[in-house]
Image (tube, rainbow, N blue to C red):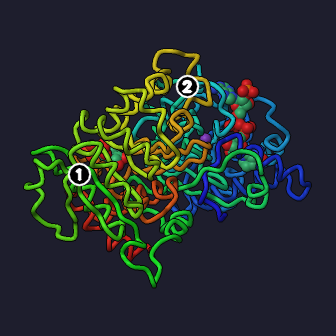
Amino acid sequence: MPIGTEILTTAQMRATESAAMASGRVSGAALMERAGRAVAGQIRLRWPRPGRVTVLCGPGNNGGDGYVIARRLHQAGWRVRVLGLDNAPGPDAEAMRRQWLAIGPILPLTEQALRDGPDSDVHVDAIFGTGLTRPPEGEIATILRHLGDSRFRDGLVAVDCPSGLCMDSGAMLGWPRGTAEHAPAARLTVAFDSPKPGHLLEQGPILCGQLVIADIGLREWREGQGAGIRLGCLWPAFDIADGRCQPVPAVVRAGLDKGRTRHGHKFSHGHALVIAGGPGRGGAARLSARAALRAGAGLVTLCPPDAAMAEHAQPPDALMRRPMDGAEDLTALLTDRRISGLCLGPGCGIDRAAVLLPALLASRRPCVLDADALTALATHPALAGALHEACVLTPHAGEFGRLFPDIAERLQSGSDDPAAMRGPAFSRLDAAREAAARAGAIVLLKGPDTVIAAPDGRAMIHSAFDLPWLATAGAGDVLAGLVAGLLARGLPALRATGLATWLHGQAARRLGPGLTADDLPEALPAVLRQSGL
Ligand SMILES: NC(=O)C1=CN([C@@H]2O[C@H](COP(=O)(O)OP(=O)(O)OC[C@H]3O[C@@H](n4cnc5c(N)ncnc54)[C@H](OP(=O)(O)O)[C@@H]3O)[C@@H](O)[C@H]2O)[C@@H](O)CC1
Ligand SMILES: Nc1ncnc2c1ncn2[C@@H]1O[C@H](COP(=O)(O)OP(=O)(O)O)[C@@H](O)[C@H]1O
Ligand SMILES: [K+]
């Protein structure tokens, strides 16, 4: 896979680097030179006129990258000041440190030295990268809080990640979980080969600023790594400031392989069934049903109880309606084998969902369970035993906490337990994977950093911190409908869920601030056309 289309954990990154070095075809020093050169190049792209830069170098290879950056910017005419530790880093970093010492001095890495120096246009944070093992303390913690001052942000460039960020979870080690106040927030982060989960989760996207993934020539060894499950990548690389994002990722493009065939008829594009709730609560399910239609399901039938049929008379006329009162009605409907995807939950009512769930799960039909269906599952735990791999659970954080309270608790912990702050911290990715394995179903954990996980450990991350306006009533109902529509079209559950999440985000990007959930399905044709899907 080309660079940037999959996500590597820090362990996978280390294994990739080790394999490359063990091959004898590339040395650690050569990789470090490429990494430093890439960062210096990105700095020169953004600041074309040589200026003044302070480079802060930590005790390991991240610091080694810093010495390369210092040398290369010096060669490009920058006035460079280097603050570093008086220690003996590994051999590659030591070699880079010596090369810098032939050019200029290394001042102590202290807050005092940082404060006392002349103003700099750019500060390069090369203190910690993937080797962070515990919360920074003492002088370095003080420096990081000092760099967290907002006046540094426009000129702060992070090497691999802002220091202190756990690259497996996106938590700032040493900060209460879920907060990053006064943490160093970069304008630009240049990471190597592939994004890591921490770039995309929790505080990562806020602190990284614009994320650039630099190719340092590791593709061959990344692809050669058999062990460990690869993480699918749905990350839109964005700049918080201007909302730019990447073109359609390859995994998404592959997602509709099983899409429309030129000789197909409407049934070959699938029949989705969206179960609605009682009188006065039909709006949510109608949003889901409209989304399922726009996702390309050949037919979509909305099934409210008989007493609520009248209120579903209005358009869209493409939507079919059919009353469904109890489990017998559902079982009878499901004798039609052409029904290939179901959606249960939005506006359904918890009691109705609990009544319908056993019949739905017994059918083993691909389905998405959202909202009230998730609450019904949480209040009737025995039902969870019937979940299967074609079920997609779409909890937001609250629903996740009700379904998997112990896992949610581990995710929260760390706020006042220092031991829990050690890296790598338990992440939303870990949480979703564990939940999926326990449920035996796909879990889509919603939020600005959505994680999708399958029971076998495959997972995807969709980072949408550029879309705060997507947090609006009904957006989740649309997402559930998109998943149901793609399931109905025959996409495997994980792929359907990933693609639905990406389309949902792209529709929101296209619409921009002011969107309502009603707008999202209508934006789909343009998104599909633009993405070539
Ligand atoms: N490998 C390669 O080929 C390439 C690697 N590259 C670069 O290397 C980076 C990874 O390098 P790395 O593994 O040396 O880790 P790094 O982030 O520099 O820190 C480790 C040092 O920090 C220390 N330490 C940790 N936590 C601490 C704390 N809280 N407070 C204080 N100390 C703490 C830790 O000490 P220890 O835990 O052993 O006490 C150790 O001394 C990676 O992000 C990328 O930038 C690129 O050049 C491409 C090629
Ligand atoms: N801050 C945010 N930024 C971007 N997307 C968000 C944010 N918060 C939530 N979302 C997304 O918005 C949708 C909201 O879904 P949900 O919480 O179920 O809302 P509702 O129940 O009102 O439909 C999900 O797709 C979620 O991932
Ligand atoms: K760093």
Left or right of residue 328: residue 93: right
Residues at circles 2 and 1 in contact by the CB criterion of under 8 Å = no
Residue receiving disc 2: 141
- In percent of the image, x 22 and y 65: which residue is there? 320
For residue 356, which numbered disc appears in the image? Answer: none
Q: Amino acid at mark 2?
A: Ala
- In percent of the image, x 43 and y 80: which residue is there? 264
Q: Residues within 10 Å of mark 2 (few under 14, many from 20)?
A: some
Give percent across and percent down for residue 60: 73, 36
Residue receiving disc 1: 285
Residue 99 vs residue 266, the one in the foreground:
266
Residue 335 vs residue 199, the one in the foreground:
335
Image-quadrant location for residue 482: bottom left
Decide if residue 201 is in sight here: yes
SS at mark 1 in the image: helix
Of the numbered discs 2 and 1, the one sitting upstream in the chain is: 2
Of marks 2 and 1, the one in the foreground: 1
Give percent across and percent down for residue 440: 54, 39
**Image quarter for ligand 3:** top right
- In percent of the image, x 46 and y 20: which residue is there? 415
Decide if residue 106 is in sight here: no
Q: Amino acid at mark 1?
A: Ala
In which quadrant of the rendered image does the C terminus lie? bottom left
Left or right of residue 293: residue 493: right
Residue 170 vs residue 34, the one in the foreground:
170
- In percent of the image, x 62 and y 61: which residue is there? 41
SS at mark 2 in the image: helix
Q: How far apart are the alpha carbons under marks 2 and 1?
A: 50 Å
Q: Residue furthest bottom?
A: 263
Give percent across and percent down for residue 446: 39, 43
Give percent across and percent down for residue 196: 60, 46
142 versus 394 height, above or below: above
